[in-house]
Image: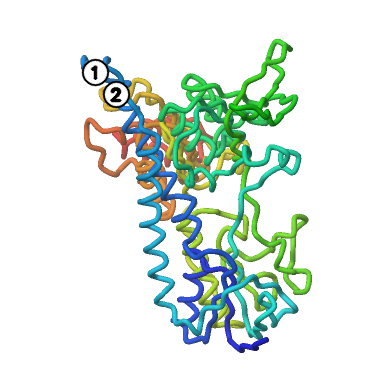
Amino acid sequence: MQMLMTEVAVIGAGTAGIAAYRAAVAAGARALIVEGGPYGTTCARVGCMPSKLMIAAAEAAHVTAKWPAFGLRLEGSLEVDGRAVMTRIRRERDRFVGFVLDAVETIPAGDRVRGAARFVDDHTLQVDDHTTIVFERAVIATGSSPRVPASWQHLGKRLIVNDDIFSWEDLPRSVAVFGPGIVGLELGQALHRLGVTVTMYGRSDHVGPFTDPELYAYAARTFQAEFPLFLDAQIVSMELVDSVDSGVAIRRVTATGSEQTIMVDYVIAAVGRAPNVRDLSLSNTGVPLDRQGVPRFDRSTMQAGSTPIFIAGDVGDDAPLLHEAADEGRLAGDNAARYPQVRAGLRRAPLAIVFSDPQLTMVGARFADLQTGTFVVGKASFENQGRSRIILKNRGLLHVYAQKSTGRFLGAEMIGPDAEHIGHLMAWALQMKLTIAQMGDMPFYHPVIEEGLRTGLRDAVFKLSSTPASNREATQEMQSAME
């Protein structure tokens, strides 16, 4: 048993953990980084990058579906080579993972500890049965894992999570996707467009990350028009079928009250992710925990209560996004090095993107976060928007939220073409604390999809003009500025 002493101990060598380690060292602290699993980050190994590789293949396969509307003809039928698709995905995924491994190798070997860490107290970690680390401050950056309902475990190897998909050597014939959230929509639609028979099930009327009723209703209709999507599905049973063509039999109650059974090769659980905290023995520390055992922390400093322990990345169950994890890691590492002189750091405007088709984006305050009567909703449809219709991507709806009292841009929810780019424009505007009028002052070329954003801004200005007289002058100025 060896004993190590350090100023900052970082648990987890993913995006947040590596950022935390580097920030602590840059601030002049002695630091160690502990990792119990494979190096390579969730994003590179099983998240952002391999999923976008699959989506890219699906988009290439799907592009021919619009050719007849443009007057184009395709002789014969398109063939999807599942083995070739998965070979490229795994090859490129491994390439991205390799970049991360190269970065890990730049960390001195003496600063890297392999093994699963658990807290003995607020200043001691036990790593497996071989190392004790005595630290002054710590950063928890252990990430998250897919949730899998315990009642589904009897499905054995036919039950998978998104992490498992990227190990496939070939595409299956059919899958059932449970959870029409970000992961479920992206991968479910991609598999459908690659020729896999996909059936998707939800447990509510919500689709994607939306909280605005009009948005998630629009999204539901849009995706239901492409593949079977049953919201608030009543599942009777899921049973493993043992035969030559073994799979899973899923029985559900239909809208008419009858029962329907389908057979699928795999059940994909896309019902969310859980912070990796179970094996950390956090009860041995002074870290405040919520009912699920997840650390409570100040997101402006990443400090957990008044303890010398900081949180970073998906383990905080706050904003499970790579850019957020990197920011949180840098902030947590820097503050761990400077403790007890912690300071608030930059937190960027909230931005989330779903790479489905059409894309989804959420910026700033959600509809559900806003107080009724304090804001107006500027609306824009992309169904007849010029450029969107020209390129046959005219499916979409944008809601822009504006504060009645000041005209400030508060946030937006959107489904539509190029939402990833429009989302960035809106996030920049939000971070700069712009008003609707100031956003309208920005240049909009013609004809571009971004003109749909201008339509939403103009609608918000029109609705702001019906506010009480005390606000009328300000809203008239907004309208003049946007003409």
Q: Nearer the viewer, residue 291 or 258?
A: 258
Residue at (53, 82) in percent of width and height: 31
Q: Position of residue 110 (x, y in %)?
A: 50, 85
Q: Mark 2 falls on what kind of element?
A: helix
* Total number of numbered discs in the rendering: 2
Report the residue marked by disc 2.
Answer: 64
Residue at the image position 64 percent from the left and 88 percent from the top: 2
For mark 1, what is the residue? 74
Do residues under tags 1 and 2 come within 8 Å of each other at their CB atoms? Answer: yes
Whichever of callouts 1 and 2 sits on the residue coming sooner in the sequence is 2
Measured as percent of width and height from the top left, residue 472 is found at 46, 37
Q: Say which quarter of the image contains residue 232.
A: top right
- Taking the image as shown, residue 8 lies to the left or right of residue 432, namely right
Q: What is the crowding at mark 1: few (fewer than 14 residues within 10 Å), some, or many (at least 20)? A: few
Amino acid under label 1? Leu
290 to 188, vertically: above or below: below
Residue 132, above or below 189: below
Regarding mark 1 in the picture, which secondary structure is present there?
loop
At which x and y percent is residue 70?
23, 17
Residue type of the residue flagged with mark 2: Thr
Evaluate whether residue 461 shows in this view.
no
